[in-house]
Image: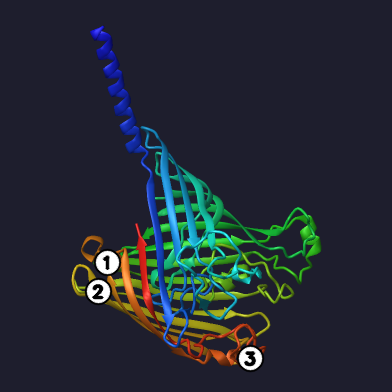
Amino acid sequence: MEKERIMKLKTLAVAITAATISSSAFALDFNGYFRAGFGMNADGGSQFCYGNGGPDAHVVGRLGNECDTYAELSFSQNVVERPTGEKFSIHTLVAYGTYEEFGFAGTRDTRGNSFQGVTGEAPEAGAETAGSPWSGQRLSFREAYAKYIMSSGMELWAGNRYYGRKDVHINDWYYVNGSGYGVGVDNINVGLGQVAVAVRHTKWHDVSGGADMRQNMASTPILDLRWKGVDVGLGSLDFIAMLGKANLSDAQEEGATDGQYNDKTGFSGTIEWALGFSGGFNKLVAQYNTEGFAWSGYGMNNHLGDSYNIGNYNNGGDAQLGRKSWRIIDHGVASFGRSFDLGYSVFYSQLDNPGSDEKGKRFGATVRPRFKWNDTMSTQVEFGYYNQEDPWEPESTDLKKVTIAQAWSPLKEKGGFWARPEIRIFATHFFGSDKDNQWWDGAAGTENPEWGGYGTGVFDKSETMFGAQVEAWW
């Protein structure tokens, strides 16, 4: 009887040990990001922002210039780990955000009341409560993919994910944005760096006018090739090449004449030189893009790689056939002793517009220096300048910004520039071209045909903002 009792205790002990080991090995990884806050206009009303997290990024910097609440919650777990080193893992990410109104020349504050819903209509939908504090907001399942990590370290993945994105944090700008559905193999060791190959499936607006009742979008796959971490002695190089082309059904192709869509193969090439040093880094980037990649590779556009634009001259003015663009970007973070650091970015870009001898030009610079008073408190100032000279606009326009912010964050424990969470109070002033001149009588939503695609600049009585915000990641 005693022997049987001892055996049961041993069995229970083994089971508890196995469960503990299993729980430890397959612990859930929880990561995330959020920003939230409020702002007010010194001339009355809510905060008004110039630029957003969408197509135009924050061209003069994001500090004191974000009119949204946004959050991402990421959950990942290893589900199988073999003694050989092989692993199977699953990854998910849910994102929430308040609406951002891209149709207006800036971003109006739509954060609404303190309790935010996660359903409802977009502000442009026309519903009675659309865009109101009670209309609900955005909820998106942005990542759902699995990885098989081989014993060699090579990875096979498939699903929906953020793939190999490259960004400038102070502008919230992804100059390479491979987000979306796909399948690929990463970390192929070739001796000098690693190679990654992926096929990503994106979609574009139906260019056939609904000719195929079984297809409501146009298929635009992208081949994504990368050679990463190539050691050149002084830093390392990353090379990225993307090829995109329309993949229309027979009915779509018959319903779309050559004047309605771009059937050419587009190319996007990126070379990035990364140099790390004590307390920071610098990245110098060169990009060249053609056809459906050209527009998203112009200016501070945020979508290079997450879609392929097959619009042509007769497709709502979405003229991509024959377009080319290039841009040079330099950005980084530097630390000077224990009390001073800064983030910075500068870029210049050009667009070759078909049928015009004039080239589009957009360029800008942002710098955010910070003085650290102690292990918790710091003072930040952000200066931004942006200029655009597009051939379809009658004159060049510019936008300037200065923000001062007092911030509290775990500087000692989390380290300098990237220490989060960070609680801020801020004051921001914008100045530059007169934005009201680009609209009929300065009335919002009333377009001035002389300008077509609008320039940049500042609206009257929307120059000075103040407020508070928190930004966090973990």
Question: At which x and y percent is residue 22?
Answer: 35, 33
Marks 3 and 2, how far apart at CA: 43 Å
Q: Earlier in the sequence, mark 3 or mark 1?
A: 1
Determine contact: label 3, label 1, CB under 8 Å: no
Q: Earlier in the sequence, mark 2 or mark 1?
A: 2
Q: Residue at x 70, y 65 (%)?
A: 263
Q: Secondary structure at mark 1?
A: loop
Q: Residue furthest top?
A: 1
Instruction: Give the labeled residue for mark 2.
Output: 378
Determine contact: label 2, label 1, CB under 8 Å: yes
Colour mode of the rendering: rainbow
What amino acid type should be assigned to the residue bearing mark 3?
Trp
Q: Nearer the viewer, residue 246 or 357?
A: 246
What amino acid type should be assigned to the residue bearing mark 2?
Ser
Q: Secondary structure at mark 2?
A: strand
Marks 2 and 1, how far apart at CA: 8 Å
Q: Is residue 16 above or below residue 325?
A: above
Instruction: Give the labeled residue for mark 3.
Output: 440
